[in-house]
Image (cartoon, rainbow, N blue to C red):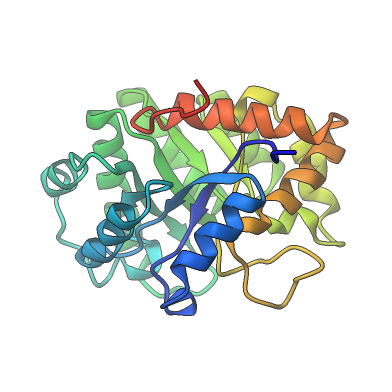
Amino acid sequence: MTAPFLVDSHCHLDFPDFEGQEVDLVARAGEAGVRRMVTISTRVRQLDRLIALTERFEEVYASVGTHPHNAGEEPGIATEELIRLSAHPKIVAIGEAGLDYHYDKAPHDTQAVVFRRHIHTARETGLPLVIHAREADDDMAAILREESTVGSFPFILHCFSSGRALAETGLELGGTISFSGILTFKRSEDIRAIAADVPMDRLLVETDAPYLAPPPYRGKRNEPAYTKLTAEVLAETKGVSYEEIARQTSDNFFRLFSKVPDPRG
């Protein structure tokens, strides 16, 4: 019996953890039903590595953007350059970009400037913006509200681990919320409570591989095949079948990531 179709909306297949293993990773993902993956950009200047992966594998797409950790390395990349790079047929999203105050690897004001450029790119291109937010809920909500007054833009609060207020702000402004292996962790009751209240048509699942592997692999390297484990917990959290969660999150993905053809027919 064929596994239900599933999408890993956020992974990092270009990271050294996976070097030389990509064929096996994609094959294992397919066996688990994960038949589309988006490998997410963290440095615009390393985009060639992601494009090479998308050209090797029909199942793999990519984004273009600068992670907040790397905002200090790429402070001068203009909106116009991001728009130009996003024209590649397998670049289907902008980011990941945002605010991360946990590690403070880049000044907060630099993170904000770079983040706003990505917002402008998403608004201009219509491609979804993949947002990284960690321990910056108030500033993130303020920027999203301010920028939304200028004009709407599609966005995902990826690997959601923030508070309920940011989730509510994101949903109010038309965003989508994506849940990673964090949802499955024993102490993530608050995250599961938030997930229970997110409308079904605003949900995505992801791995953020190689990070945040769900049980029974917690503490080990994550990979796209394990999207299924997070989707199973999300189904339980929402009180629906795994098949329904797989279908709904895939529907949501193809609606939001509109450059990706839906192979389901």
Q: Quadrant of residue 83?
A: top left
Residue at 37%, 53% (x, y): give it: 57
Foreground residue among 106 and 81:
81
Relative to residue 185, is residue 223 drawn left or right?
A: left
Foreground residue among 147 and 129:
129
User: Is there any visible trace of residue 159 in the rendered image?
Assistant: no
Residue at 50%, 52% (x, y): give it: 10
Q: Position of residue 140 (x, y in %)?
A: 48, 47
Relative to residue 74, is residue 229 drawn left or right?
A: right
User: Is there any visible trace of residue 38 in the rendered image?
Assistant: yes
Q: Position of residue 45 (x, y in %)?
A: 20, 66
Eyeballing the image, is 62 above or below 45? above
Relative to residue 124, is residue 30 drawn left or right?
A: right
Q: Position of residue 206 (x, y in %)?
A: 59, 50
Q: Which quadrant does the N terminus fall into?
A: top right
Relative to residue 46, is residue 197 drawn left or right?
A: right
Which residue is most to the top?
265
Eyeballing the image, is 214 above or below 201? below
Residue at 60%, 60% (x, y): give it: 28
